[in-house]
Amino acid sequence: MGRRAHAMLFPFPCSGHINPTLKLAELLHARGVHVTFVNTEHNHERLRRGAAAAGLRGREGFRFEAVPDGLSDEDRRGPDRTVRLYLSMRRSCVAPLVALARALAERDDGVPPVTCVVLSGLVSFALDAAEAIGVPAFVLWGTSACGFVCTLRLRELRQRGYTPLKDESDLTNGYLDTPIDWIAGIPPVQLGDVSSFVRTLDPQCFALRVEEDEANSCARARGLILNTFEDLEPDVLDALRGEFPQVYTIGPLAAAMHAAQGDAGGGLSLWEEDAACMAWLDAQAPGSVLYVSFGSLAVLSPEQLAELAWGLAASARPFLWAVRPGLVAGDRGADALPEGFAAATWGRGLVAEWCAQEQVLRHRAVGGFLTHSGWNSTAESIWAGVPMVCWPGFADQYINARYTCGEWGVGLRLDEALRREQVAAHVEELMGDTARAREMRRNAARWKAAAEAATAPGGSSYESLGRLVEELRLGDD
Ligand code: UDP
């Protein structure tokens, strides 16, 4: 057994990266690793102002620090802010991270110097910081293994001429149905399933190249950590290990956290959770409620929102819908819901800004999830044993939806162009008592049991986390 490890964790500053990184931090800490969790100053302030302040105070062996992201207030607003943030962090974060690690080493507080850096996707520059500090780096790539492999293969898709698209008609003329059967570990899929980034019309392929570069840069890390479990994606994990010898599958992270800390295992949320949701759910019949959420980043047009709303109204099922500010184009939220919707769904629908999603999914009243197929949401739903209606729109969400509906048999997919009739029909099919619905529920129960077994002592994810902790502890010894 080596020295005591000290992991410096640094996620890209959005919920989809912060949440899993924080869970990993908690799990490492519970196994005796010192943790320094690094936010950007902007998010640190946001968390400090919100309900998360208590969590930020840290505990023995677990502290929070912050580095500047280099973005001006003006650049922080507007439609391309995530791109600007990404570019700004690449330019300005390496030196502060290195300086932080050095400053921590000099503090006379009995905490050992940083022995490893754990980064999320989109912050591959932190690999340079790890090199400068002189410690190994590990990447927590926040998608499924299938999502990661598809992202890795974007480069080949570009080089083989599948993408960028020739013109806009390729989005609708069937081109995206082109079979892709050569990605090792992935069953035959269609081009459009691989990733949203193949849909680019940009001849420079900016976003596509960022994604492929970020994924391929993981090869520079000592190990790759994935929020999945062995039984869920055996073929793709096998294929991946040919390229990445050190893959640690430690998910579903929500399940692992629950196994380690029970219901106390909450997180830091950039959003305030609406406590009324749980009381409302308590009053609903078991398995009767459809939970609807599109994560932290998706932006819908007012027309898409209206199709969804009227689809939910027509389905006649109780629903809980998380409509965060910014879900609708123009920085709008629930105020953009169509006129008459509240009256049409009176008494059977609840609209909240932001829910404690893991708790919601695990509530006995929830029987279905209408989701954008973000990986955290999908993994949480798998763990909760809740079947899904999938409406993917970005990045790995397409391949997650493909696996959810195909390989795992726990979902129904909505067409890209939302239609209220299809929304209502799919919700009805998911929540109703048809043979298909019963089969999806049986499959969901099976995956729930498998997720619990993987994260329980002796399970594959539990053991994999143990191996990771051992590797972090050994560091460069
Ligand atoms: N989430 C939540 N409350 C909500 C909506 C989302 O806590 O009302 C959480 C959800 O549990 C998940 C994360 O936000 O952990 C969303 O991550 P995901 O990968 O699904 O989507 P992204 O936000 O990255 O598109």
Image: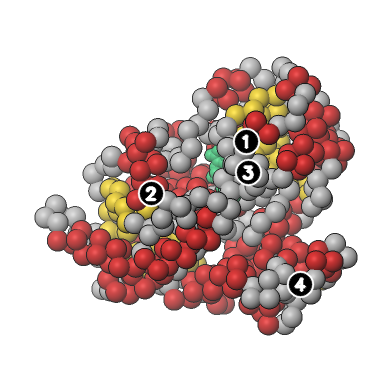
**CA gap, disc 3 to disc 4?**
28 Å
Q: Determine the CA span between mark 1 and mark 4.
A: 32 Å
Amino acid found under the numbered disc labelled 3: Gly
Q: Nearer the viewer, residue 232 or 359?
A: 359
Cα separation, mark 2 vs mark 3, equals: 22 Å
Name the disc covering residue 330, or none: 3
Q: Nearer the viewer, mark 1 or mark 3?
A: 3
| Residue 333 image label | 1
Q: Residue at x 36, y 73 (%)?
A: 128
Tell me the quadrant of the picture where the C terminus can be found: bottom left
Label 2: how many Cα within 10 Å (few below 14, some 14–19, many 20+): some
Q: Is residue 74 above or below residue 425?
A: below
**Residue type (three-letter) at the residue carrying disc 2:** His
Labelled disc at residue 42? 2
Residue 422 shows in this picture: yes
Q: Position of residue 330 (x, y in %)?
A: 63, 43
Query: How far, Cα to Cα, is label 2 from label 4?
Result: 37 Å
The residue tagged with tag 3: helix, strand or loop? loop
2 and 4 marks in contact (CB < 8 Å): no
Task: Judge whether 113 appears above or below 212 on screen.
Answer: above
